[in-house]
Image (cartoon, grey):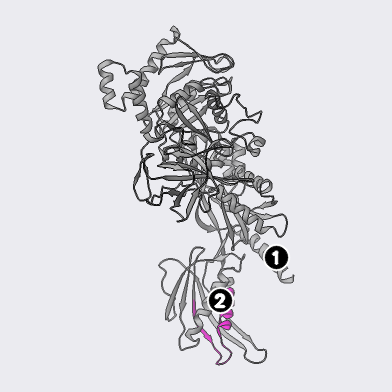
Amino acid sequence: MAAEFDTSHVKNVVLLGHAGSGKTTLAECFLFEAGLISRRGTITEKNTVGDYHELEQERGNSIFSKLMHTKWRGYKINIIDTPGYDDFVGEVLSALRVSDTGIMLLNAAMGVEVGTDVIWQYTEEFKTPMIFAVNHLDNEKADFDNTVREAKNHFGNNVTVIQYPLQQGEGFHAIVDVLRMTMYKFKDAGGKPEKLPIPAEEKERADMLHKELIEAVAGNDETLMEKYFEKGELDEDEIRSGMKKAMINHDLFPLFCLSAERNMGSGRLMGFIDNVCPGANEMPPQVSVKGEDIACDAAKPVCAFVYKAISEPHVGELSFMKVFSGTLKAGTDLINETTGVSEKLNQLFVMEGNKRVGVGELSAGDIGATLKLKNTHVNNTLHEKNVSYELKPIVFPAPNMSIAISTVKKGEEEKLSAALHQLREEDPTLIVKVSSELKQTIIYCQGDMHLAVIKWKLQHQHKVDVVFEEPKIPYRETIRTAAEAVYRHKKQSGGAGQFGEVHMRIEPWYEGMPEPAGLNVRGRDIQELPWGGKLVFYNCIVGGAIDQRFLPSILKGVMEKMQEGPLTGSYVRDIRVSVFDGRMHPVDSNDISFKIAGLMAFKNAFQLAAPQLLEPIYQVEVLCPEDLTGAVMGDLQTRRALVEGIDAERNFTRIIAKVPLAEMNDYSSSLRSITQGRAKFKMLFHEYAVVPFETQRKLTEQYNKVAGEEMVG
C-alpha cells in the first residue's frame, strides 16, 4: 500500500495545555469531524481514542502522548495528544520535536495556568508555530476577556484574536469569527454550525478586532503592509499567506474559541489547520549535528528520527518516528547513525491511538511507527547507507525527585533490573543508578505522579513488586583543624610477620594553601577524588625511615579509609596528608603492613582533627501563582531553606532558594498539595555545606550503633 498523501499534504499538530484543559476531548472532536470515528468518546466513559491505556482510564487523565491521524479536505493531519502534568514533560518534548504546529488549550474558567507557562517555554525553544484555543467557554465561570488578557500578558501581544464568544457560560452557543467576518451559531448538541451575519450590536467590536488582525498580519510582511496601505484591506488569500509566514516566524499566535465538550468550534479550527497552518514541507529544514540542512523532500535520501518508544505486551517494542526526508518503504534497510547498526524496517504503521494501520511507505514529513528494531532507541537517527545524517537529539530535563527502590521478594533483583532497563528505554526522563556509595538502587524521576506510573508499570506489566524508601543522603566528611597520629602495625604468627609504622599529619586542604610547616617536602601527589574534592598526599620522609616503595601502599590505605569515613561511613574530601616519619623492619615490612598502618594513622588523626560532616545543598527554583507565594515560602522555611531571591513574573512568583537535599524528599507531593498542582520546581546541585551540630551528632550516633551491631553480628 503506497502512501496516500505526498509531502505537501501532511500536517503534524500537537495538542498542548495544562491538565484538564480539554486536549483529549478536542482530539475526539477532530476525529469525529473528519469521520474517522462515528461517536465521540468521553473521559468519564473511558472510551476515547487517545486515553486508551488502563492506567489513564483509572486516573482520568493523560499520562502518555498518543499519535492519531485523520484526513481532512485532501490533507493527512497527524495529531499528537499530550499529558498536561509537568511530571510527564518528556512526552511533551518528544511530541514537540516532530510537530509543525501546536494548539495550546486555555481553560476559560482558569485562565493561564502554570502548566501552560511551563509548556510555552519549550515551544519557544522549538520555535513551534502556535495556535491558542480558549476552551470550556460553556463553563459557568468562563471569562474569555480575562483569559485573553492573561495570554497577552504571559505570551506577548502576538496573541491575536480570531474569534470571540457571543455569550459565555451556560448560554454559550455562538462564535464571532473576525477573520471571515461571520458568526457561527451552534445547536445544543454542537457539530456543524449555521453561518450567520454578525449581529449589528457586535459589528463595531468585530470590525475593530478584524482591523487588529489585518494590522498584525501586515506588520510582519513589508509587501502586505504596502498593499494594506494602498487598499485599506487585505483579501483572504493575502491574510492566509501572511498568517502562515508570521506563524512560522513565531510572530503571530491566532486565538480561537471552543467548547470541546459540546463539539463547538472544532470544525473551524480543523479548517484553519488545513488552510493556514504550515505543512511539514513548509517548515525550515532540519539542521543536523554537523550543520547540514535536511530539507523535507520525498525525493531525497531517507532520514528518520525516533522520538518515542513503547513496549506492548505480546508485540514487543514499537518505535515512533518522523520521516524528515525521503520516502521510507517497508522492508528498507537503514543505518542507525548513533549505534552504526543496520536495521530492517519490515513493517510500517500509521497510528489511531492504540490501533496500528499497516502502510507500504511513509513520505517525508509524515509520522509513523515500526516494530522490533534491534538496537535503536529514542533520539537515534536512521538513514540510507549512502549518507551520514545525525539529527539533533531531544534534550530532556533533569529529574526533580529521587527514591531508593528494592524488590519485595528476595531473588528478584535481576528481574527488577531488566524491568527498569525496559522502562528507561521507553522514558528518557527516568534515570536509574546503582549507587555503590549508598548501597542502593536509586531512580530519578520528575515527581510523585511520575513515580506512581513507574510503580504501576513494574507491578502490572513486569510483575515485580517493589518498595520505595528514602534514598540515603550522600554526605561528605572533612576536618577543621590539623592533627597528627602515629600508628604501628605489628603482627607475628610464626614465620614472616607484618610490620609498618607511619607518622602522619593531616590538615584541611584549600586551594593555594602554603606548604606544610616544619616538614621537608620530597614529593607531592594530588588526587582528584571521583566524589568531589581533593586529597593532596605529601612525602616528607627524611633519612630513609620508610622506603619509597611503601608510600603507594600508605596512600592506598588512606584512600581506602576516605571511601568510608570515620564519622558516618561517607566519602571524605579536601584533606592534605603529610607522611613525615615511620619505621620499617628488614624482614617483616611489606605493602599490606604499610597499607594498614597508613589507614589507621589516617583514621586516628581524623578523629583528632575536629571532624566535620557536610551535606549536599541544592538550588531550588519554584514557580508558583502569586496568591500562593506565602504558603510556598512557609513550606520552604520548614526545610531549612535559605531564600535568595523572589521575582515577580506576570501573575507568578519565582522563588530561588538553597535547600539541603535531606529536606527535599517529599517536596514534589508537598508542593502539589499546597498549590493544587499549580506550581512547578526544578533543583540542581549547588555545593556541600556544613551540617548543623545536632544533626551531625545524631547521624554519627546512628552510624556507630549500626557499625557496632554489625561487628557483634
**Rendering coords of residue 685 (x, y %):** 50, 53
Q: How many marks?
A: 2
Q: Quadrant of the C terminus?
A: bottom right
The boundaries of the magenta stretch are: 578-604
Q: Secondary structure at mark 1?
A: helix
Q: Residue furthest top?
A: 200
Question: On the rendered structure, is 484 left or right of 335?
Answer: right
Residue kind at label 1, given as amino acid type: Lys
Question: On the rendered structure, is 445 left or right of 521?
Answer: right
- Between 243 and 202, which is closer to the camera in this rendering? 243
Q: Residues within 10 Å of mark 2 (few under 14, many from 20)?
A: many
Q: Residues within 10 Å of mark 1 (few under 14, many from 20)?
A: few
Q: Is residue 121 visible?
A: no
Q: Secondary structure at mark 2?
A: helix
Indicate yes or no whether the magenta region holds residue 140.
Answer: no
Q: Looking at the picture, does residue 5 appear above or below residue 525?
A: above
Pointer 2 residue:
557
Pointer 1 residue:
705
Cα gap from disc 1 to disc 2, whole angstroms: 24 Å
User: Which is more foreground, mark 1 or mark 2?
Assistant: 2
Residue at point 69% right, 51% down?
464
Question: On the rendered structure, is 213 left or right of 85?
Answer: left
Indicate yes or no whether the magenta region holds residue 593.
Answer: yes
**Rendering coords of residue 488 (x, y %):** 59, 83
Q: Is residue 534 visible?
A: yes
**Rendering coords of residue 6 (x, y %):** 41, 33
Which of the two labelled residues, at mark 1 and mark 2, occupies the earlier sequence position?
2
Q: Looking at the picture, does residue 571 appear above or below residue 142?
A: below
The tag on residue 508 is none
